[in-house]
Amino acid sequence: MKLLVQYLYQLKLDKTILWCYFIWYVVVVYFYFDPSSKIWINAVGISAVIGTALVLSVSSGKGGKRDYWQTFRLYLMPFCVSSFSALIKEQGFIVVISPKIKETLVAVSCCALFLCVVLVIKRTKNKIA
């Protein structure tokens, strides 16, 4: 738990936004999950191709220290985009917004809760430190 609090305390705005994207993705998967292996196999394939291209595009080619968390994200993002797109196809979404207000409110609420937790940790640790 201490490591999680420390991670959230050090979390910068860019990574906080990425976490909100991921939370939104998880909420949509919860509401629209499809067990069809075709969706998930295609998402893995696209992730492998695009993720590798992204890793190559950000590598310096000098054999320096590899950031494994960044590499994981570079593969995770195309997987999420691909599977998200397949799950919401013909569901009436406007970009990433569900046509069902309940689902959108759940996603917004989950992101807001995450942001509040991060804010409380940052404010509390600043007063303690």
Image (tube, rainbow, N blue to C red):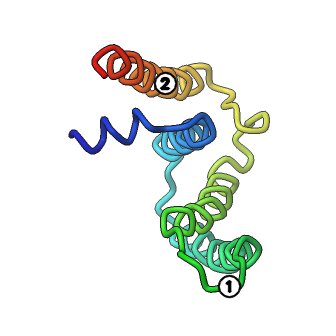
Q: At x 63% / y 40%, what residue is drawn? A: 14
Q: Where residue 79 appears, x then y in whole percent?
A: 60, 64
Residue located beneath label 1 in the image: 62
SS at mark 2 in the image: helix
The vertical placement of 91 against 121, above or below, is: below
Quadrant position of the C terminus in the picture:
top left
Near mark 2 (Cα within 10 A), the count class, few <14, some 14-19 or many ≥20, is some
Near mark 1 (Cα within 10 A), the count class, few <14, some 14-19 or many ≥20, is few
Q: At x 44% / y 38%, what residue is drawn? A: 10
Relative side of 98 to 71, left or right: right
Along the line of sight, which residue is nearer the eye, 21 or 62?
62
Q: Where residue 74 appears, x then y in whole percent?
A: 62, 65
Mark 2 against mark 1, which lies toward the viewer? Answer: 1
Residue located beneath label 2 in the image: 115
Quadrant position of the N terminus in the picture:
top left
SS at mark 1 in the image: loop
Along the line of sight, which residue is nearer the eye, 51 or 59?
59
Asked if the residue at tag 1 contacts the one at tag 2, i.e. Cβ–Cβ closer than 8 Å, the answer is: no
User: Separation of disc 2 and disc 1 at Cα?
Assistant: 37 Å
Q: Of the residues shown, which amino acid type is indicated by label 1?
A: Lys
Q: Of the residues shown, which amino acid type is indicated by label 2?
A: Leu
Q: At x 33% / y 38%, what residue is drawn? A: 6
